[in-house]
Image (cartoon, rainbow, N blue to C red):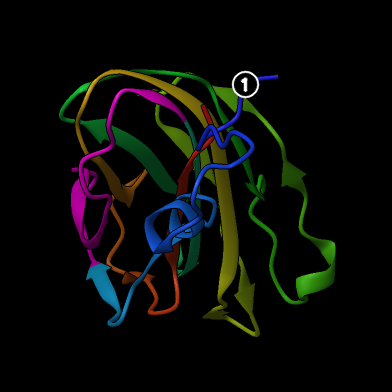
Amino acid sequence: MATYPDIEVGDPIDDDTLNAMQYSTIIKSANQTIVSSTTFQDDSELVTPTLDAGKWSVWLDLLSSGGTPFKVEWTNTGTMTGNRRCVGPGSTETDTLSNVNAQWPDRGFATDNVYGYRTESGSPAQYWISEHSIITVTVAGAIQARWGQNASSAVTTTVHSGSFWKFKRVV
């Protein structure tokens, strides 16, 4: 089985080798909002550095709130392939957080996914979205998280601080 980094018996283990075995993480430090717009917007912080050719494990976690269905897509500056596994609210439910329906679709790399939303006692509640992919990078580039309202709403949609990208080269 191929792994990254490739370490042979007798090879020196240095900081770069040890770091290559760990996920790198970008954590969103500030909330970002959108209102009355179905246009995708680039997240101001959730963009990876350039990923070199190879196979990568990429994981996007979003903490969000709002009063309308919410859509997410990934764009990239290189050439990349792989399907995203998406987990999040699949329905619009109100009153209690315990009655939300979830979804687990498999989406193409550049295909948007629409999530439901939650309200608690009439106010937008925070909810969690997780997307993961094993991608093949053939031409190096960065991945940008983009999101927006699926239907225009005067209720603000927010992606909260603490949302993150994790990425690691695996082959």
Residue 52 vs residue 150: left or right?
left
Residue 111 vs residue 154: left or right?
right
Residue 41 is one of the magenta-drawn residues = yes
Q: Position of residue 15 (x, y in %)?
A: 41, 63
Q: Position of residue 8 (x, y in %)?
A: 59, 33
Give the residues in magenta.
Answer: 34-55
Q: Is residue 116 visible?
A: no
Q: Is residue 121 visible?
A: yes
Q: Foreground residue, 103 or 38?
A: 103
Q: Position of residue 153 (x, y in %)?
A: 31, 59
Residue under the point 71% across and 36% down:
104
Q: Quadrant of the N terminus?
A: top right
Residue 157 vs residue 164: left or right?
left
Residue under the point 47% across and 45% down:
168
User: Is 146 placed above or below 157 here?
Assistant: above
Per the image, label 1 sits on a secondary structure element best described as loop
| Residue carrying label 1 | 2
